[in-house]
Image (spheres, rainbow, N blue to C red):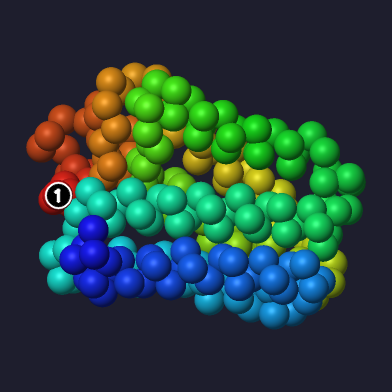
Amino acid sequence: MIEALRKPANIATAVRFFSIPVLWVFAFLGNGLVLGIGLVIASLTDSVDGALARKLDHVSSFGSKFDSIADHTLQLSAVVWLGMLRPEVFIENPFLVWTALGMNLFSLLFGLVKFRRLANLHLYTSKAVYPLFVTFVAHAFIFGQYSKVLLYIACIGIIVAYTEAILLQIVRNRVDEHIGSILFLYLDENHPLQRFAPKRSRN
């Protein structure tokens, strides 16, 4: 494990993971500006670690799991911070917000129950919606009010992404950390879109 943490990609993930307690301090202090900026910076490491892993050929099962743990911890923390600093988001949009959160939590719990582990699928839809979520939350923190447009975009994206994740977990008997999309299961292996299928992990 120590050796794995020395890899540049995992160092980037560790920066994200260990920045979370620091951001919690600013959440308790009610400092939305610093919290919003910190959230953006921490989230950017999600792109950095993946790029480094592919460039240096350090794609691994450990890195994939660590990345998912860091992602989920940061995302769940951001939701709690939103409730602390911008409770009106939940009060004024209960159906949309709780539907999105419910899909997220159901997907997480379903994977834990079925596979007895975190189902770190790393789907393209989830990767696409992550910056939308961060943009909405960071904007709400930094500017002191939330954007309805950004909220709807983020929540609809989350619902779509986790619908795919749930369906994939239903039809699969094991976790494939780099499947990319449920579409790759049903496309012929010679289909042109298969070139976008992610590279398989190495232990």
Which residue is painted at 72% across and 73% down in the image?
Answer: 26
Q: Is residue 144 above or below residue 104?
A: below
Which amino acid type is marked by label 1?
Asn
Indicate the position of residue 118 as horizontal and vertical percent values.
40, 38
Indicate the position of residue 107 as horizontal and vertical percent values.
51, 31
Q: Nearer the viewer, residue 188 or 4?
A: 4
Q: Is residue 172 above or below residue 57?
A: above
Q: Nearer the viewer, residue 19 or 140?
A: 19
In the displayed orientation, state which residue is furthest to the left.
190
Q: Which residue is mark 1?
A: 203
Q: Crowdedness of circle 1 by 10 Å Cα count: few (<14), some, many (20+)?
A: few
Which residue is painted at 60% across and 62% down in the image?
Answer: 134
Q: Name the side, left or right, on which 152 lies relative to 189.
A: right
Image quadrant holding the N terminus, namely bottom left
Q: Please indicate, yes or no, whether residue 131 appears anywhere in the rendered image.
A: yes
Q: Is residue 86 above or below residue 197?
A: below
Q: Name the side, left or right, on which 170 lies relative to 9.
A: right
Q: Nearer the viewer, residue 132 or 9?
A: 9
Q: Please indicate, yes or no, whether residue 195 appears anywhere in the rendered image.
A: no
Indicate the position of residue 139 as horizontal and vertical percent values.
71, 70
Which residue is painted at 39% across and 67% down in the image?
Answer: 14
Q: Name the side, left or right, on which 139 lies relative to 185.
A: right
* Quadrant in which residue 33 is drawn: bottom right
* Quadrant in which residue 58 is drawn: bottom left
Indicate the position of residue 131 as horizontal and vertical percent values.
53, 62
Q: Is residue 115 above or below residue 198?
A: above
How many marks the image carries: the answer is 1
The secondary element bearing badge 1 is classed as: loop
